[in-house]
Amino acid sequence: MIRALLVIDVQNEYFDGKLPITYPKDCFENILKAIDSAIKYEIPVILVQHTNPREDSFTFKMGTEEWEIHKEVLKRVYDYIIEKNLPGSFTGTELESWLKENSIDTVVICGYMTQMCCDTTARQAMQLGFNVEFLSDATGTLDASNYAGEINAGELHKAILITQAMKFSKVIPTDEWIKKK
């Protein structure tokens, strides 16, 4: 397997903005641990940055502090930054072609939010023929509520991991993934 680590939307919006990640508590530390391990084992690191294209957007507005990738992530070595406007990291981006040009056959998913951009990207990757490893403790989410109901972050996260493991990904904790390198 030739892997690439996708670090999805680890942006300030999820720390100091309108969407603070709350679960799991150590997900950010595990994201950094995954990046550091990828660098050590010469696994390409691809940062994915979400941009809301609407001028009146309240989140992920280009040029704002909240839109910026977290400074601890940017301190580390990375190979490429992909900007996306939708939940899937492959939609309207050069990600698929970059992965194929670099002979990548397996993508490793970490970042935010578990149920949105991480889940969507993992499903897209599988459908495009990539193997997918989903780092269970290096993705994160928050409590969610809308007109359809409400769910706490822990249950939401768990539901996505179970669904990912059914068909789309190999769900694995960060420390176990690192040991297999």
Image (spheres, rainbow, N blue to C red):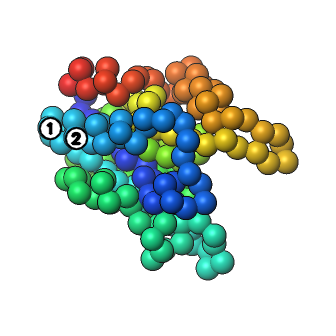
Along the viewing direction, whichever of 68 and 8 lies nearer the viewer: 68
Query: Where residue 19 sits: x, y (%)?
Result: 59, 54
Secondary structure beneath dot 1 equals: helix
Residue occupied by mark 2 = 36
In the rendered image, residue 115, in percent from the top left (x then y), is placed at 59, 40
Q: Quick check: 170 above or below 73?
A: above
Residue at (55% x, 26% y) in the render = 161
Q: Quadrant of the N terminus?
A: top left
Q: Which amino acid, mark 2?
A: Asp
- Label 1 Cα crowd, 10 Å radius (few <14 / some 14-19 / many 20+): few
34 displayed left or right of 141:
left
Q: Do callouts 1 and 2 mark residues in contact (Cβ within 8 Å)?
A: yes
Residue in the picture at 63% in, 72% down? 57
Q: Nearer the viewer, residue 94 or 174?
A: 174
Q: Mark 1 sits on what residue?
A: 40
Give percent across and percent down for residue 13: 51, 60
Q: In the image, residue 86 lies at what x, y percent?
A: 56, 58
Location of the C terminus by quadrant is: top left
Whether 142 is drawn above or below 106: the answer is: below
Mark 2 burial class by Cα count in 10 Å: few <14, some 14-19, many 20+: some
Q: Is residue 90 visible?
A: no
Disc assigned to residue 75: none
| Observer able to see residue 180 | yes
Q: Is residue 15 left or right of residue 103?
A: right
C-alpha distance separating marks 1 and 2? 6 Å
- Name the amino acid, label 1: Lys
